[in-house]
Structures are given as C-alpha cells and as structure tokens.
Image (cartoon, rainbow, N blue to C red):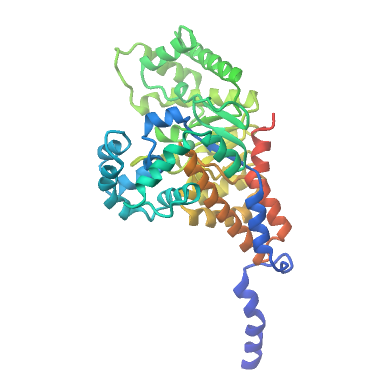
Amino acid sequence: MKKALLFFVLLLGPLLSKSQVQIRPLPLKGYEQRIIDFINDMKVVDTHEHLMSPTRLKQRTALDFMVLLHHYSADDIISSGLPAKLFAKLRKDSLTVKQKWDILKPYWESSKNTAYNRAALLAADKLFGISDINELTVELLSEKIKKAYQTDWISHVVNDKCKIEYLIQDSDDRSFGTKGFRYVVRFDSFIFINSKQQITSLGKRQNIDIANLDDLIKALGSAFNDAKQKGFVAIKSGLAYNRILNYENTSRGSSAKVFEDLMSSPDGTTFTFEDVKPLQDFMMHRVLDLARDNKLPVMIHTGLHTGNGNIIENSKPTHLVNLIMEYPTVKFVLMHGSYPYGAELTTIAKYFPNAYIDMCWLYVISPSYSERFLHEWIETVPASKIMGFGGDYLNIENAYSHLLMGKQVVARVLIDKVKDCYLSESEAKNIARMILHDNAVELFNLSQ
Ligand SMILES: [Zn+2]
C-alpha cells in the first residue's frame, strides 16, 4: 500500500509542482527568448500620458537630474520625510545641482527602493548611460539631460526608443500635434460643482448665461462640441481625487433644487458634498449621455491617487457598478489596475461586457502587483478587454523606463503561462500584441 502511494506521488510530483492546470503541450525549447524578443520588437500603444512640452516641463522643474524625480518619485521622497516645501525648492533653478543633491541624498537613500524611484534609475541608465544616481553622477546626468532637450528629444524617445504607434495624452497641451498623438478630454468641471462661482465661470467659458439646470446642461453640450472640433478619443474623469465614485441616478427635481440653492446663496459660499451630491451625480449622468450618444469610451481614475494623502476608499471600482449597468453601450475603462483593489476590478471586468482594464501607471506603482493581477486577469477576463500599458508621466524619460518595466512584467507572466502549459507560445504572443497594441487601437478607434 505504501509502495503504491509512493509510486503515485512520484508520478504526480512533477505535474503538481509545475502548475495547477495544463491545457497545452510542453513548449518548444527557446520559447522564453522568443517571447521576450517578440515583445521588445513590437509597436505599442500608450493609453495614458500627461507629457509636457519642453517649455512646460521647464516651468515645472529645472532641466537637470530632477526631471527624473519631480513627478511620482517626489511622492515617495516626500513620504520618506523630505518636507514638500523643501522638495519644491529642488525643482527650481535657484540651487546648484550639488546643493540639491545634498538636501535630497538622505531621503533618496531611504526611498530609492520603490518602483517609482527604480523607474528613475532605469531611465538614467538606459537613456543617459548613467548607472546610478548619486553624488558622483548627478552633475553629469544633469548635463546630459540639458543637452538632450536641445534636440528633438521627446519624439526621439516616443518613436525610436519606445516604438509607440499611438499615444493618448490627458492634457490641455496639444503642442505634440496629431501624428501618433491622440487626446482625451475631461468634463469634470461640469460635474464637480459646489458653488455659484463655478457655475458662473462655466457659463462665461461657454458664452452662455446659466440661469437654470437646462442652461447648465446646454453649456456642457457646448463644451463637448468645442472639444469635438479639436478631436478626442475618450472622455476622462479624474473625480476620484475629489469625491466618492458612487453616482446615483438622481432626479431632475432634486438636482434643480440644488442648482437653485447654489444660485441663490451668498457670494463665496461653498456647499458641503452631501448638499451638492444630487446635482453632481445628475451631471455625471449627463456626461455619460454624451458618451453614449457619441460612442465614446469613458476612462475613469480608480485606485491610488498621486500625491501624499487622499481617501482611498473613494476610488474603489465597485462604486461604479450602477453606472456600468445603467449605460451598457458605454465602454468604461477602469484605470490604474484599480490599485489596491485589483480583485474588485477582476470581478467587474469579468462580469460586464462594457468594463475594461487599463494598466496605465501600474508597473511603477508595483511590478509584483501588476504581475500577480495580470496572471489572474489572463485567467479570468477576456484578453481583448485588457490594456497593458500607459506611462502616465509628465516626462518622457520615465514613461520610457516604465514601458521597459511593463514589458518585463508582461513577458514574465506570459512565459510563466507558457511554461505552465496554460497557453501555447503563439497564444502568448497573440495576447502580448492584443494587450500592448491591438485592444487600445480598437477600443479608442485610434487609426481614424
Ligand atoms: Zn494620469
């Protein structure tokens, strides 16, 4: 009996240690490198960036080594203890590179482990040949950055280094043109209303005297048409930074009442969220009406907020379920892998044909979270609904290193799936092409 058990264990052992399920035959030798090469060679779509033109970038940060650290890295450096006000000084030209480094050094040392900061290290290495950021290298790195910006640097990195075919910008800065660049537009200012002044200024902007709720809806329609003239591929909402993502289908009557209360309030009054919620929720539904009628996807910020403090529960993707159900023809793109609510996102994207996963920003939040959930999503969600990359950076250098990190994670997950005989090699390559390119082209109609 014991012998039979031993035989059984020996027989099953290799299978059990390999994977849970084996669907495909063992792959042919060399598949790992072939998958890596396939991913490295392909054109990609970048679903989400906030790239700044060199002129705008210079307004935000000096063109020295701080270009690599002024954005997400800043959050972790501040989280490690550097006061935000002092960090702001590091972005200006008033200090020398050496003076900046002396202030930054202890905080960099204590936070350089994070993926935000790893992205900066990788950018320094892969774009400027500087293998570490330290007191011996910051000056040379700064010189190289300055020099790079005297060339057509951004398009060189976008086209030659990243091989990005289409890049979707979430920014008013349209100086990048339309060759390969596409744009999203936000109508959040028509939703997040809590004062009379906001309504008045929306009216001024659209040249409409807003006296009642219908006028407000008219002004929204006019802003939408203006944006349409310039061209855009999706509506973006970043309101999870400001309020809970739960938008009830409130009645016109209750919304009109809030509108009237706001308009008759004394100048300078700001209403509480509870007081204005019916109107805000109502206006979100009007934005979704426009998305539906114009067949435009809606990208919604879910999960982690940038910066150093916010209410994370506000951005849980499950708050959006009622909207996803009420607008079945509107495609909802839930951004940032909903970190840390990946399991909620899995369920939503699995249930609803009109819910999509966007992994923009995700690999620099956490490569291992990205890996864990990409594994799960391949097992649970149609691959056609996963968008595998968006840099989500203000500067192109970190978008590039982010892409390198993303490609490593995607390759690793797909190699594992082939090794485990869950996917064949050709299925894995096909999924890579879908999630890093084809899905976004189709969803956002990018080739138009
Ligand atoms: Zn973003």
Q: Position of residue 140 (x, y in %)?
A: 38, 46
- Taking 232 as reference, is 111 above or below it? below
Q: At 40% across and 39% down in the image, what residue appears?
A: 67
Give the quadrant of the N terminus.
bottom right
Question: Of 97 and 416, which appears nearest the observer?
Answer: 97
Residue 69 visible at all: no
Q: At 68% across and 37% down in the image, what residue appears?
A: 442
Q: How many marks?
A: 0
- Taking 4 as reference, is 186 above or below it? above
Question: Of 172 and 304, which appears nearest the observer?
Answer: 172
Q: Position of residue 351 (x, y in %)?
A: 62, 46
Question: Of 400 and 346, which appears nearest the observer?
Answer: 400
Drawn side of residue 229 relative to residue 114, left or right: right
Give the quadrant of the C terminus.
top right
- Taking 329 as reference, is 267 above or below it? above
Q: Quadrant of residue 267?
A: top left
Q: Position of residue 404 (x, y in %)?
A: 54, 50
Q: At 39% across and 36% down in the image, what residue appears?
A: 63
Q: Position of residue 106 (x, y in %)?
A: 27, 52
Q: At 36% across and 50% down in the image, what residue appears?
A: 137
Drawn side of residue 210 relative to residue 234, left or right: left
- Taking 447 as reference, is 254 above or below it? above
